[in-house]
Each structure stands twice: as C-alpha cells, then as structure tokens.
Image: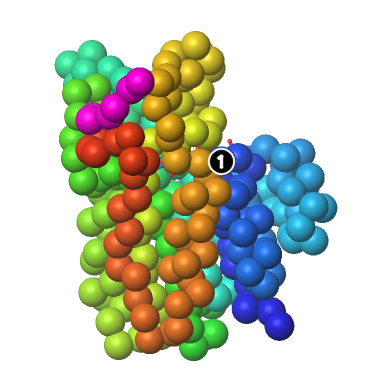
Amino acid sequence: MSLGTAVVTGASSGIGMATARRLSAEGFEVVVGARREQRLNALADELGARAIRLDVTDPASVQRFCAAVPDCRVVVNAAGGAIGRDRVEDSTDDDWLWMYETNVIGALRMTRALLPALEATGDGHVVMVGSIAGYEPYVGGGGYNAAKFAVRAMTKVLRMELLGRPIRVTEIAPGLVKTEFSVVRFRGDEHAAEAVYEGLTPLTAEDVAECIAFAVTRPSHVNIDTLVVLARDQSGAATVHRR
Ligand SMILES: NC(=O)c1ccc[n+]([C@@H]2O[C@H](COP(=O)([O-])OP(=O)(O)OC[C@H]3O[C@@H](n4cnc5c(N)ncnc54)[C@H](OP(=O)(O)O)[C@@H]3O)[C@@H](O)[C@H]2O)c1
C-alpha cells in the first residue's frame, strides 16, 4: 500500500539520495529533485520514482517543481550544504549568500509552495535537514552556523504556526556524515575533504535516512520535533575523537 507521495530535495547525492531510497522502500511514491539531472534520472529509474530538475535558489524552478506534485504528503528538505571554512573576518558575501539561499530560503520556498498540498492530505509532514551546526557554533563555521541556526528557527516557528492543523514538522540535525558535503565545502579539494573524517567513524547517509524514515512513519498523532544524531566519535560540533 502506498504511504503517499514524498518529495526529497537534494536527492542527487548523500542524505537526500539515501532518503529517497529508504522512503521508496518504506512504500512512499517518491519525487526527487536536484540540479544534476543525470544522477536524478538514474535514481528515479532504480526506484521507479519521478525525477524533476530543481534549483531551490530559483523561484521559477521551485514553482515548476511543486506544480508538478499536486499530491504531496511528505517533503524532506535535504538540499543544502556549506561553502568554505573561513573565519568571519575573511569570509565573502558570495559564500554566505550561497549558504543562506540554499539552506534557508530554498527550504522556505519549497515548504511554502507545498504546504497546501501537504495539508490537503490530512496528514502532511515537513522534514528539515538541519545540522549540529545549527546548535553549536565553531571557529570557521560562521556562514554555515548562521544558515543552520536559521533553519532551526524557521522550523520551530513553523511548528508553532501549524499547531492545530494536520501537518507535522521535524528537524533532523546530524553531525559528521560522509557524503559529498566536504568536497563541496572545500570546493572540490578531495584531500581536505578526506581529512575531515580521518581516524574517526562518521555517520553514513543511510544512518540519517533511517532517522528520517523513523520520523515520517510514526502514527500521525506523533510529532518527532527534533532529532540530533551524531557519530559515537563526535560529541559536539567541533569535538571529535580520532584514532
Ligand atoms: N554531510 C554532513 O556532514 C552533514 C551534516 C549535517 C547536515 N548536513 C546537511 O544535510 C543536507 C544534505 O547534505 P549531504 O551531506 O547529503 O551533502 P551532498 O552529498 O553534497 O548533497 C547535497 C545535495 O544538495 C543538492 N543541492 C545543492 N544545492 C542545490 C540547489 N540549489 N537546488 C537543489 N539542490 C541542491 C545537491 O544536488 P545538486 O548539486 O545536483 O543540485 C545534492 O543532492 C544539507 O542540508 C547539509 O547541510 C550534512
């Protein structure tokens, strides 16, 4: 039996891709979005899902995507990431804007556009992929911290504003997850990206997908508000154990 339609953004890689796979296995009809269409189409073929190109920083793209999904029970806002590890004094407007537009405004746009469809199902669910960076600042994290703190604030406000309506709101906030996240953050420098996970066992994208699947498969009166999930080798945003 179908559990309804689940939209997953950022599904061309990492947490979004693992979540699309997991929700498809759970019985959702999955619609995947991201900018890299080849990857999306391969995933859609694998899952029997629908792929629609999506750039969450482009209002017209979001509008086109959401208009193609008139029935939507779950949206997982996984599109996002970080650029750079610069100190605030050395950071650039462009990097901060990228992070804010993708993580914050992108998730806002998608959620706002899909809310009527989510509500119409009588059991809608908004999942935001936040981060431990939205809870704990760290040196060199300024722009990403600001963006993920904003995601957390928006998620809490949304939860309050939707109280009494049939839409659940969940923030999943992971720590270190080995995906393409660090390659993007270090602008393609694979060496710098590898060093982030050196000597420790990070979370996998599947670990996070499992948390998301747990949240969206609870009975409809149960709202998992926040789930912070870290590797055993990480006790805080900047506190890790390396062997
Ligand atoms: N990995 C971690 O350690 C970690 C920890 C905490 C939170 N997170 C969060 O988890 C989420 C997923 O990250 P990840 O670790 O899976 O990284 P990832 O492997 O780099 O995946 C990021 C995804 O976001 C998509 N994306 C980026 N910009 C987009 C845009 N403008 N429009 C649509 N899609 C866009 C990318 O697809 P395209 O490039 O094809 O568009 C890709 O599918 C992000 O919000 C990230 O901040 C990650």
Image height of 128 relative to 236, above or below? below
Work out whether residue 109 or residue 126 is closer to the camera in this orientation and state it: 126
| x and y, in percent, of residue 97 in the image | 35, 33
Whether residue 33 appears in this view of the structure is yes
Magenta: main secondary structure equals: loop
Name the residue tied to disc 1: 14
Work out whether residue 197 or residue 67 is closer to the camera in this orientation and state it: 197
Whether residue 65 appears in this view of the structure is no
The part of the image, by quadrant, that contains residue 6 is bottom right
Q: Which residues are magenta?
A: 238-243
Query: Split into 4 quadrants, where in the image is the C terminus?
Result: top left
Q: Is residue 28 magenta?
A: no
Q: Amino acid at mark 1?
A: Gly
Q: Is residue 240 magenta?
A: yes
Query: Split into 4 quadrants, where in the image is the N terminus?
Result: bottom right
Work out whether residue 194 or residue 185 is closer to the camera in this orientation and state it: 194
Is label 1's Cβ within 8 Å of ligand 1? yes
| x and y, in percent, of residue 231 in the image | 37, 41
